[in-house]
Image: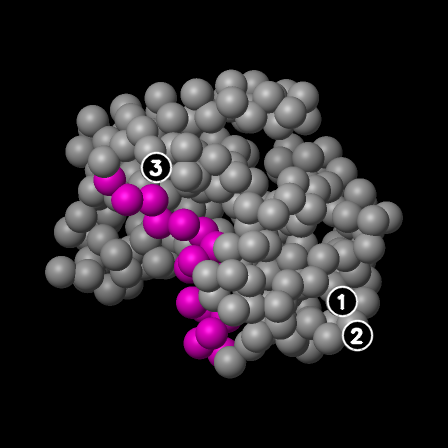
Amino acid sequence: MKTIGLLGGMSWESTAEYYRLINQTVRDRLGPLHSARIAMISLDFSEIEELQHAGKWDEAGQILGDAAQAIERAGADFLVICTNTMHKLADDIQARIGIPILHVADTLAAAVRTLGVHEVALLATRFTMEEPFYRERLETAHGMTVLVPAETDRTIIHQVIFDELCAGRIEESSRAEFLRIANTLAGQGAEGIALACTEIGFLIKPGDLHIPVFDTAHIHAVAAVDLALAD
């Protein structure tokens, strides 16, 4: 079994879900007393969030890069960045380490292809929905069509993520808003909804919509186990 490197804490709520899903999947595949080999560093998200919203991505990259190097030194065979948004810095982090990054967008694309879906809508932070680093990878590398919500809905999603989900709050009014937004996107042609923020899976479940829901935290975690057990 390979050692999985987890770069987490962004937020710890979803990182805990990664840890649970990875170990649960290993147990299910190998037997009741098995668990995953993991080297993990969990960062203080408050520090990262301030840098995100200040546009200080280089400083955030320095923090994540240092943590990734420490995870590599701890014996990890590959790195899982337990957040979609910070994959904005994936290339910079990859340049600083010798182990591969299991990119969340690539694992999402593989799951989408499995169901024969070609057009997906992103529910995510404003950074992930609006900047090119995520959408272009899906479109260029994987041939997908990507939709995003309207401006006012992007604002709602972003605020709920940071003010509620990352703080461990699940509000029914926010669930209703997210479902409204998702159904609007389905009406615009989306064949699937990508929960491209690792906390949104606490709010929306696959059975909540009439089209497929792709929870990136779950997909990414299971893909990490696939890679760890590949040989």
Q: Which mark is residue 187?
A: 2
In the displayed structure, 69 sits above or below 142; it is above
Nearer to the camera, 206 or 142? 142
Residue drawn at x 65%, y 40% is 127
Regarding mark 2 in the picture, which secondary structure is present there?
A: helix
Residue drawn at x 76%, y 67% is 185
Nearer to the camera, 90 or 213? 90
Q: Which residues are magenta?
A: 99-115
Give the mark, 1 or 3, whose residue is nearer the N terminus.
3
Q: Is residue 172 left or right of residue 88?
A: right
Q: Residues within 10 Å of mark 1 (few under 14, many from 20)?
A: many
Nearer to the camera, 169 or 84? 84
Q: Which mark is residue 185?
A: 1
Nearer to the camera, 106 or 3? 106
- Amino acid marked by disc 3: Gln
* Residue 41: quadrant of the picture: top left
Furthest-bottom residue in this view = 116
Q: For the residues marked 1 and 2, what is the alpha-carbon distance in whole angstroms?
A: 5 Å
Q: Which mark is residue 94?
A: 3
Residue drawn at x 67%, y 54% is 123
